[in-house]
Image (tube, grey):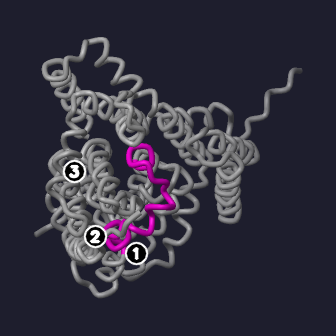
Amino acid sequence: MPLEPEIRTPREPTLLEAVVTLVLVFAVVLVGIRLQGGLTRSPLPLLLALGVVSVVGLQLRVGWNAIQQGLVNGIARVGIAVFVVLLVGALVGVWIQAGIIPSLVYYGLRLVTPGAFLATAFGACAVMSTVTGTSYGTMGTVGVALMGIAAGLGVHLPLAAGAVISGAFFGDKMSPLSETTNIAAAMGVVDLFAHIRSMLFTTVPAAVIALGLFLLVRGGASSGGSVALCLSVLIGAVWALLFQGASPVGVVDAAVDGFAPATGVEAIDGLFGRGGMAAMAPVAMIIIAAGALGGGLGAIGVLERALTAPLSRVRSAGTLVVSVLVSCYGILVFTGSTTLSLVLPGQAFLPAFQANGVDARVLTRTLEDGGTLASPLVPWTGAALVATQMLGVPTLSYLPYVWFVLLVPVFSVICGYTGIGVWRTTASDPAHASE
């Protein structure tokens, strides 16, 4: 009589197994980055970490099919980010060829003084990102021009990058056109504009202090967004054809391979010789690898177990806020995905906010204070990779100067423990924001 194949039921990881797995993944990524001399050279460290996830998954009796489906789901979540990254590369190449970015640099050098540069950069990028809803596009256009101006004025480049990134992520957090703004609101089933109004409590004081710091420091010597990017590339291409005498083939080359000026001046050629989708291909590969890693961790249940473990001890609004922030940071570190850093803590913590009578607006605001704003601080996220590629400054060099990004979570915690901007719900309306 033939024996029936044994059916292996997956088991949930223990808290210890979840923590050990995450520590191993983090260690493999960090060691791999160090041995390779930087993550941007290859996504291999993330793929090696994915091997660790697969081995743990097999120990938990999770089948190969389930793990592979998790990888596919993770990659699908970052598909839009990959598309946007490639568009940013095309945008930079075409705008340089069209003379738009060089013109911004030229007039910026004539109009902006070193003392006002950092505050101007912060303000200009904040306006640009709020109007367009994209931090990537802001860094790739106005940001590139501002870095050229900073070089001409002798401003410390990591400090200039900090001002640019701070402004770019102000709009990414506050714009109703931003993908992250809409995702965070959806996680708490909160009206979009109620969500944006709730963020004023942490965003405005942080922005005012950051602007003051950028004014005081003189620099020293030394979603709808992707549609906007498509239109910007098209406008740049038409401008290059009409006013720069570029050929259609030349425009396509600039979009794909970047623009290579030949002025004979090394500094200028180095400043404007950038852009192109090909230059962003390594960034896209890393985003895909990070998405796969996040999907794998989700498939074997490690992320969910690590998130739900502390919920039983969470009671006060302040503790809830801190727990959400820490969870957002952890998801970013282990997956490199901004979307997952909003979705997973949002799903995990919404019941806890409801059970403790804290309005969901506090949750959605905290998701953005953590997940959205921390994304340029983790070197293997798409945001950090785009910032490094476009602005020419490594993540760890600009990190101490992104003052707006660093200040917002501080005010988030202050609000949580003081009760400022913390609304309570009634039993009949536990999740929706009511004004």
Q: Residue at x 37, y 81 (%)?
A: 318
- Prevailing secondary structure class for the magenta stretch in the rendered image: helix
Return the residue nearer the eye: 202 or 434.
202
| Sooner in the amino-acid sequence: mark 3 or mark 2 | 3
What is the quadrant of residue 345 in the picture? Answer: bottom left
Q: Do we see residue 427 in this rendering?
A: no
Q: Residue at x 20, y 32 (%)?
A: 232
- Name the residue that disc number 3 marks: 129
**In the rendered structure, are the residues bearing label 1 and label 2 in contact, judged by CB atoms less than 8 Å apart?**
yes
Q: Amino acid at mark 3?
A: Ser
117 falls in the magenta region = no
**Mark 1 neighbour density, 10 Å: few (under 14) some (14–19) many (20 or more):** many
Please tell me the numbered disc located at residue 320: 1
396 falls in the magenta region = yes
Q: Is residue 31 left or right of residue 93?
A: right
State how far apart marks 3 and 2 are (Cα): 23 Å
| Sooner in the amino-acid sequence: mark 1 or mark 2 | 1
- Range of magenta residues: 387-409
What is the quadrant of residue 390 in the picture? Answer: top left
Asked if residue 430 is positioned above or below residue 48 in the image, the reply reads below
- Name the residue that disc number 2 marks: 362
